[in-house]
Image (spheres, rainbow, N blue to C red):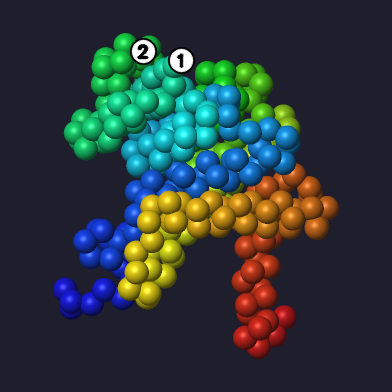
Amino acid sequence: LRNEFTGVLTGKGRSFGGSLIRPEATGFGAVYYVQEMLKTFGEEVKGKTFAISGFGNVAWGTAMKVAELGGKVVTISGPDGYVYDADGVVTEEKLNFMLEMRASGRDRVQDYADKFGVPFFAGKRPWEQKVDVVMPCATQNEVGEEDAKNIVANGVKYYAEVANLPSTDVAIKVLKAAGVVIAPSKAVNAGGVAVSGLEMSQNSMRYSWTAEEVDAKLHQIMADIYKNSWDAAKKYGMEGDLIAGANIAGFEKVADAMIAQGVAY
């Protein structure tokens, strides 16, 4: 409105100062976090199966990056239920169709099942499927106690919150009690904010990075977030508790800044 493009508004269109891969950023960042988490336990994304929810930008970015790293997303979901694609949402056609579904405004994941001939489970959630990694990407409180019990019963070892607070408190307790490694949304879904920061950096330089450059910077940011969370938990005797680690790392960052500014402690 004021003919100013200073980066105060982020997520802008490419023609007026936006950054490449911003729509994919939250999903990409989440997978990079999970990649670092798996490395800690001597594992990798390649060859793993993933259950995710939703089919919007976050789920799309997650499925795309999982496929790029050699993994396979086998579920996506909508308000009407979920689909199970044993071959994985890995081809360009399938990934592009997720965008078509989103753009259609129909809000039906059954359209995917109809197009690709895969099973559709009406009114159900994907957490009943046996996979290696669970990544809820859709909405708040979408994983409840019974869902968590299904996840545990299926022997899932890794659980990463991609949506904002997708798990109820009871679900987290069930997962923690079973020894599932839980990556909290506070850390996992930081990729979108990270690329908004990168967008502002590009605005200030009057220069646009390539998609590959933005992606590489996002990867490093998410690796650092994971390391900070892991190290903070270990430092305070809670090694492996990424929820505690993320909270502690966040608190220490704010506290250090306050002390540096002369605030008494």
Amino acid identity at mark 2: Val
User: Where on the picture, by quarter, is residue 57?
Assistant: top left
Residue on which the image places disc 2: 118
Q: Are marks 2 and 1 in contact (CB under 8 Å)?
A: yes
Q: State whether residue 142 appears in this view.
A: no
Quadrant containing the C terminus is bottom right
Identify the residue under disc 1: 86
**Number of residues whose C-alpha sits closer than 10 Å to that of mark 2, classed few (under 14), some (14–19) or many (20 or more):** some
Image-based side of 3 in relation to 43, left or right: left
Q: Earlier in the sequence, mark 2 or mark 1?
A: 1
- x and y, in percent, of residue 23 in the image: 34, 49
- Number of on-image labels: 2
Quarter where residue 251 is shown: bottom right
Label 1 secondary element: loop
Q: Does the rendering let one see residue 117?
A: yes
Residue sitting at x 31%, y 68%: 9
Q: Position of residue 115 (x, y in %)?
A: 26, 17
